[in-house]
Image (cartoon, rainbow, N blue to C red):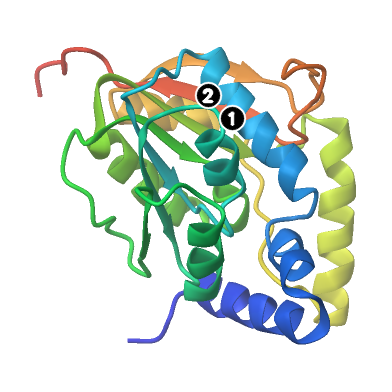
Amino acid sequence: MADFHFVEDYARLVASLKERLPIDEAMSQAVGGAYERFGEIEADILEHYGLRDGEGVLDFGCGSGRLAHALGKRRTIAYLGIDIVQDLLDYAATKAPAHYRFRMNRTLALPVIDEAAEWCCAFSVFTHLLHTESYIYLQELARIAKPGGLILFSFLEFACPGHWAVFAETVEGQRRSTLPHLNMFIERPVIRLWADKLGLEVVEIVDAAEPRWNGYALGQSLAVLRRPAARPPA
């Protein structure tokens, strides 16, 4: 079976960056740049919502390990990072505590048991997937989250004025056939509908430009969902 579009896109992007740049810069650019700062912001987000020592974190789309690196300096947790490019995972492992686990997966089913983690996060992942793919992966995260656990993901939305530039650049890239990867927008009613269909609670949706994380903004909007402590009857 052929690889999904996102596998081909990111394998090609990472290979190109490694050819042109020193490894640390290539691994930073592969996840959008500002490796240290955005890793700290992502760790701030998890701590804001209550991450504690001893809990489990599934970092879906962990990339080159910016969140793993930041969490490793702060918390003693069980961590699993999943991504589609082995070069990114190999680099992430060098930036994280030795007991952190990393796994490559290129299917729509995540290789994690039910109710495995208190925290499931996907930063800058659904931004590059078709809606059907995002919904399937959100189903997987809902399965993997423990009862009462949180699911956090970032997204692009047209309601955010700052995101128009991403769309405009995507339009130009499409016109010139130079897009390195897909950019996909998700609007808040869609997220609320998905959450309702999956039996998840919407805890909060945070604006992309809100400087809530120690004075910094994430730059993408943030959805915070909770798996209820008890599943409603089917």
Which of the numbered marks, if any, corresponds to residue 43? 1
In space, the residues marked 1 and 2 are separated at their CA atoms by 5 Å
Which disc is residue 129 wearing? Answer: none
- Residue at 62% x, 23% y is 44
The kind of secondary structure element at disc 1 is helix
For this rendering, which residue is in front, 190 or 25? 25
Quarter of the image with the C terminus in it = top left
Horizontal placement of 16 versus 231: left or right?
Answer: right
In the rendering, at what x and y percent does residue 127 appear? Answer: 62, 50
Residue 172 image point, x, y percent:
89, 68
Is residue 193 in sight in this rendering? Answer: yes
Q: Quadrant of the N terminus?
A: bottom left
Q: Callout 1: few (<14), some (14-19), or many (20+) C-alpha neighbours within 10 Å?
A: many
The correct choice, above or below, for 102 with respect to 90 in the image is above
Residue 174 percent across, percent down from the top left:
80, 72
Q: How many marks?
A: 2
Q: Which quadrant of the view contains residue 103?
A: bottom left
Q: Residue 72: x and y, percent?
A: 51, 38
Residue type, label 2: Leu
Give the residue displayed 38% in from the left and 21% down from the top.
53
The residue at the far left in this view is 233
Q: Which residue is mark 2?
A: 46
Q: Nearer the viewer, residue 95 or 39?
A: 95
Viewed as shown, does residue 92 lie left or right of 163? left
Q: Are marks 1 and 2 in contact (CB under 8 Å)?
A: yes
Name the residue at 80% across, 18% down: 211
Decide: few, some or many residues near mark 2? Use Cα within 10 Å; few <14, some 14-19, many ≥20. Answer: some
